[in-house]
């Protein structure tokens, strides 16, 4: 029975473009790369490449190149013979052997040493390698998919990544857009995660997000992308508990407290409380709107009122930028 495709949730055009490109690439039996910031879902895209390929019913293996030392990574990938090093009491097949006729995902491939990169290149080029401590050549048929959150051409320029390996891996490159440019997907994903968290926590129902919570979600830049959003939503649903009303407080920073160690000495609990008490009922919403307006105005000034350039500076598309200008009533100077 065929395993279900990894779920990719989103409706923003930039995200759907990446999904479509991934689906088109999947059946092409070539090595490739999935790149994107941390937390964007690279592992889901890489798995989709496997399950939509002719190799879907063969083995899918994954190894994190950043989690192992050079020697351990080499042994993990290529296996070893008995006596190859201290503690190697028996022959062990590596991941390349176990993934034969299937797919191998090399997460954080930029962290592999140059020596390991050289051996990976040989497998991609010729389909062969030797176990650590061995001399027999082993033949395999494995599709290699690399993933990374760094600029690989930049690593090549600095001498930290092999240019010939990058050439082989870059048959095609799927670049996943960060969450901050997927404005349409932020609340959509938040609601999906909230319903999942509600069920996992054994709560009766999810009553939605209050408007102030939605504004907070949209105002945040999400440096941790979808992974950060999931954590924030789960934390906020848990904090709301069994309340039947919509979630009104989004807890982005769980360390935010007047008692946090290292907080400046003049920031006392009493001062925090009095500042909060003096806020008007809609103070948070106004603060978010004012901050958003300042960002728009600064981007326009920086780009000399070139709207397309200002939109790119903020990580928005042109139409999103124009809608925000209209929402805040920002008028452009006449020429």
Image (tube, rainbow, N blue to C red):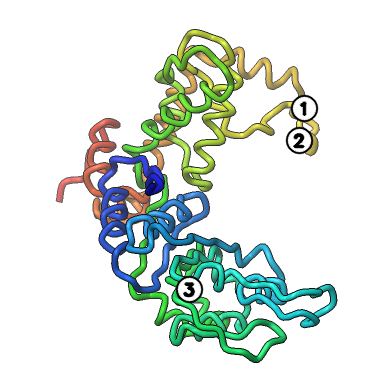
Q: Secondary structure at mark 1?
A: loop
Give me the residue at 77% from left, 79% from top. 82
Instruction: Say whether residue 288 is left or right of residue 279.
Output: left
Which residue, as the protein is rendered here, is positioned at the far left?
Answer: 335
Q: Secondary structure at mark 3?
A: helix
Q: Residue 263 has which mark?
A: 2
Q: Secondary structure at mark 2?
A: loop
Question: Crowdedness of circle 2 by 10 Å Cα count: few (<14), some, many (20+)?
Answer: few
The percent position of residue 179, horizontal first and vertical second, equals 41, 45
Q: Residue 152 has which mark?
A: 3
Give me the residue at 23% from left, 34% from top. 326
Q: CA distance from mark 2 to mark 3?
A: 39 Å
Instruction: Say whether residue 229 is left or right of residue 12.
Output: right
Q: Residue 143 has which mark?
A: none
| Mark 2 vs 1: CB contact within 8 A | yes
Q: Which residue is mark 1?
A: 259
Q: Of residues 167 and 160, which is closer to you in this image?
A: 167
The percent position of residue 135, horizontal first and vertical second, equals 65, 91
Give me the residue at 61% from left, 17% from top. 276
The percent position of residue 43, horizontal first and vertical second, equals 48, 54
Q: CA distance from mark 3 to mark 1?
A: 42 Å
């Amino acid at each position: 029975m065929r395993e279900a495709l990894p779920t990719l949730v989103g409706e923003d055009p930039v995200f759907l473009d990446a999904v479509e490109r991934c689906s088109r690439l999947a059946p092409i039996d070539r090595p490739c790369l999935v790149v994107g910031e941390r937390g964007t879902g690279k592992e889901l895209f890489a798995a989709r490449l496997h399950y939509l390929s002719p190799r879907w019913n063969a083995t899918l293996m994954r190894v994190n190149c950043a989690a192992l030392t050079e020697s351990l990574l080499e042994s993990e990938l290529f296996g070893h013979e008995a006596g190859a090093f201290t503690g190697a009491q028996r022959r062990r097949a590596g991941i390349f052997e176990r993934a034969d006729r299937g797919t191998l995902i090399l997460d954080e491939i930029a962290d592999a040493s140059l020596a390991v990169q050289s051996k990976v290149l040989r497998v991609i080029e010729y389909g062969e390698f030797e176990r650590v401590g061995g001399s027999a050549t082993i033949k395999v048929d494995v599709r290699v998919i690399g993933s990374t959150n760094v600029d690989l051409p930049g690593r090549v320029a600095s001498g930290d990544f092999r240019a010939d390996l990058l050439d082989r891996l870059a048959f095609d490159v799927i670049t996943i857009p960060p969450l901050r440019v997927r404005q349409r997907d932020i609340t959509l994903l938040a609601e999906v995660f909230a319903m999942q968290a509600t069920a996992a926590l054994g709560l009766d129902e999810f009553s939605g997000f209050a408007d102030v919570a939605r504004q907070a979600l949209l105002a945040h830049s999400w440096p941790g992308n979808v992974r950060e959003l999931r954590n924030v939503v789960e934390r906020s649903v848990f904090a709301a508990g069994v309340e039947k009303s919509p979630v009104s407080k989004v807890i982005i920073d769980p360390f935010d407290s007047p008692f946090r160690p290292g907080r400046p000495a003049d920031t006392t609990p009493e001062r925090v409380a009095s500042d909060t008490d003096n806020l008007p009922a809609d103070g948070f919403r106004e603060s978010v709107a004012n901050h958003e307006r300042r960002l728009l105005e600064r981007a326009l000034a920086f780009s000399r009122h070139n709207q397309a350039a200002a939109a790119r500076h903020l990580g928005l598309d042109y139409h999103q930028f124009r809608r925000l200008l209209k929402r805040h009533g920002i008028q452009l100077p006449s020429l």
